[in-house]
Amino acid sequence: MLPLTTYRNLQVFLVVMAVIGMSFALFFLQRYMGFTPCPLCVFQRIGLIVMGVFALMAALFHPKSMAVRLVLWLGSLVGIGWATVVAGRHVWLQHLPADQVPSCGPGLDYWLDTLPILQVFKEVFAGSGECAAIDWTFMGLSIPEQSLILFSLLLVVHGLVLWRIVRPIASK
């Protein structure tokens, strides 16, 4: 039997978690529950998708070169790191006192149509009232809090992947 922590198995796990996370967001939260994702939710999804794409490439091609493995790992890490930072910001916004929550502004579509991309990032990270709203909880955790926990777990898995990549060097 193959160990569960082989390089390829860890990559497959990351892909499966990205698919589960996106399926939950798209089919359960968005379609079934009827929630529209706020700009910070959209940015978290982008990070999860980026991680999933790099992990899928690593799982499918199973590169032997350490350099290629590190590049794919770094791309995946950047994606999930991005999602984790955005989720952390989202959780922070949700825990602000009501008088400190930024006011609601125009939607992400409007910003993308009218502002330069760097200004869009600035506006999204400033947050808005819609990002601070808690629409649904599970076991007392809001959606961004659940996302932050998932993304933190995936960062730990990235540590295991890195260990699998550099382990041959360490054993010499």
Image: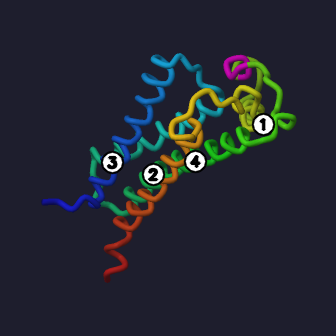
Q: Quadrant of residue 166?
A: bottom left
What residue is rendered at 63% in x and 48% in y?
A: 85
Q: Is residue 13 magenta?
A: no
Q: Secondary structure at mark 2?
A: helix
Report, in whole angstroms, how far the alpha carbon at label 2 lies from the one at label 1.
Answer: 26 Å
What residue sits right under mark 2 in the picture? 154
Q: Is residue 110 magenta?
A: yes
Q: Secondary structure at mark 1?
A: helix
Bounds of the magenta span?
Answer: 107-111
Q: Secondary structure at mark 3?
A: helix
What residue sits right under mark 1 in the picture? 126
CB contact under 8 Å: marks 4 and 1: no
Determine whether, in the image, residue 95 is placed left or right of residue 59: right
Nearer-N-terminus badge (4/2): 4
What residue sits right under mark 4 in the picture? 84
Per the rendering, the mark at residue 13 is 3
Q: Amino acid at mark 4?
A: Thr
Q: Residue furthest left?
A: 1
**Measured from the top left, where is residue 101 in percent x and y?**
81, 34
Nearer-N-terminus badge (3/2): 3
